Amino acid sequence: MGAIGPKPFIQNHVIQVNGDTATGNCAVEIRVIEKGESVTACGHYDDNYRRVNGKWKFAKRVFHLYHWAKLSEGWAGKTTGPSLK
């Protein structure tokens, strides 16, 4: 089987609307198959939105990675994001 993914699972959207613009953030868990190995990742998105002709569009999206690790190796010790203390 070749590479599959990424398959993002997005949750916990928080959006603040201010007229025709908005900001938001959400958590994401990602599953991927890379070179025949299962990979897990997680992080969060910081988003900016803009209403254009009555429809909401992404103006900007920034991804903050916490970890990207093969399941066979585990993700402990691979954190790159904010401290979980």
Image (cartoon, grey):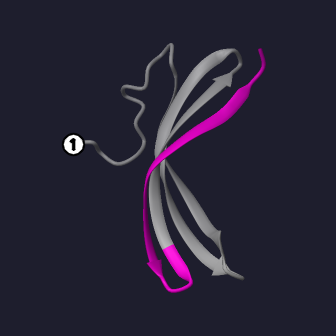
Quarter of the image with the C terminus in it: top left
How packed is label 1: few (under 14 Cα within 10 Å), some, or many (20 or more)? few
- Where in the figure is residue 14, as x and y percent of width and height? 41, 61
Extreme-bottom residue of the structure? 19
Extreme-front residue of the structure? 54
Amino acid type at mark 1 = Lys
Q: Residue at x 44, y 20 (%)?
A: 74
First to last magenta residue range: 1-22
Q: Residue at x 46, y 54 (%)?
A: 26
- Where in the figure is residue 81, as x and y percent of width and height? 40, 46
Q: Residue 40 colored magenta?
A: no
In the rendered view, tell whether residue 14 sits above or below residue 69.
below
Q: Residue at x 56, y 84 (%)?
A: 20
Between residue 13 and residue 38, name the one nearer to us.
13
Extreme-right residue of the structure? 2
Give left or right: position of 8 versus 14. right
Quarter of the image with the N terminus in it: top right
In the rendered view, tell whether residue 61 sits above or below residue 6.
below
Residue under circle 1? Answer: 85
Q: How many marks?
A: 1
Q: Secondary structure at mark 1?
A: loop
Q: Residue 18 colored magenta?
A: yes
- Where in the figure is residue 30, as x and y percent of width and height? 55, 35
Q: Main secondary structure of the magenta part?
A: strand
- Where in the figure is residue 79, as x and y percent of width and height? 40, 36
